[in-house]
Amino acid sequence: MIRISNHYISAEFSTIGAQLTRLSDGTHEYLWSGNPAFWRFQAPILFPIVGRLKNDQYTFNGNTYKMHQHGFARESEFKLIKLDEQQVTFGLTDNAQTTQNYPFKFKLTVTYTLNKETIMVNYQVMNPGSDELLFSIGAHPAFNMSLDSRSDFDRVKLQVSPAAKFERIKLVGPYSDIKHPEQIDLTNPLTIKRSLFDNDAIILNLHSQPVKMGLINSSEHGVEIKLTNSPYVGVWSPFPKNAPFICIEPWWGIADNVDSTGNFSQKMGINRLSSHEQFDAGYSIKLI
C-alpha cells in the first residue's frame, strides 16, 4: 500500500495503473471501493486513448493495431518514482509490450499532491523519441455517493461553475457524434437520476475553458472537481445498475467519431508532441 496524508485527508494508491484507491477525511470514504459487481476500477488513468476506437483498432503508417477501450495504462505496472509525506509520483515508459499495439516512444508521469482538503493530480507526457508522439489522456475517478446513512443517489446534485448552458456530445453506441451536439442546461444544479446515463456518459465539450464541477449529496457532503484546461469532461454511472457512485472524468481526448476513418493521425481529440516536447495537464479534487 502506498499512502500520503496531511491533517485533513489521506490517500492510498496502487502501482497498477498508478490508480488512486482510497480518499478519506477520516470520517467519510469519498472514493468508490471498486466492487466488481458494479465496476472493478476506482480512478483509472486513460492512456494512450480515451473511450473506444472504431472496431477497437486503428491504422498508423500503413499498419493496423488493436487497442481496447481507454488504452493500456490502467492495467500497467507503474514505477514508484518519488514518495513524500504529502506527494507521490509514478512513471510509465514504452516497453516491448506497449510497442506491440502502440508504436510510439513515451514517458508518462503522474503526480498526486495534497493541499489541505484537496488532492491535485498532474499528468506529464514526454516524447523521448525522434518521431512525433500521438496520444490522448484522461481521468476516470469514481466518487462514493453513499457517504453516510442519510445519503440517497437520486438526491445528489451536480453543480457547475460557471453556471451555463453547455454543448453536449451524444454517443451513438460507444462512439462520439461530434457533428450533432445538443445543449444541456446547467445554469441550475442538476439532480442526478440514473436515467440520465441510459445512453452512457454525459459528455460536455468544454472547449478547454476552466470549470468547477461539484457532486453534493443530501447530507451536503461530496467533492468539487476543478478542471483548468480539459477539452472534454464525462459524467457517468453504470446504467441500469444501482451503483452508488458517480464519475467526473476530465479528458484530453475522446472516443472515435461515428464517421472515423480509423487513421490515428486524423483521430478526433488527438494530442501531438514533437521530439523531446512535453505535455502537461491536470485537475484537482476537493473534499466537501
Image (cartoon, rainbow, N blue to C red):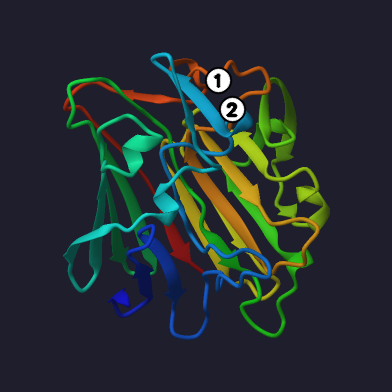
**Toward the viewer: 108 or 22?**
108
Q: Quadrant of residue 221?
A: bottom right
Left or right for 39, reference 76: right
The quarter of the picture where the N terminus appears is bottom left
Residue 192 falls in which quadrant of the image?
bottom right
Confirm whether residue 273 shows in the render: yes
Where does residue 230 sit, x and y in percent of width and height? Answer: 45, 36
Q: CA distance from mark 1 to mark 2?
A: 8 Å
Q: Which residue is mark 1?
A: 262
Instruction: Name the residue located 37 percent from the left edge and 62 percent from the top edge.
Output: 16
In this view, the residue in front, 127 or 12, is 127
- Residue 206 visible in this rendered orientation of the protein: no
**Looking at the image, do the residues carrying marks 1 and 2 touch, with CB atoms under 8 Å apart?**
yes
Which residue is under mark 2? 256
Residue 166 located left or right of residue 129: right
User: Looking at the picture, which amino acid does disc 2 mark?
Assistant: Asp
Residue 213, image x, y percentages:
56, 50
Q: Callout 2: 10 Å neighbours few (<14), some, many (20+)?
A: many
Q: Secondary structure at mark 2?
A: loop
Q: Residue at x 48, y 15 (%)?
A: 266
Q: Is residue 13 above or below residue 63?
A: below
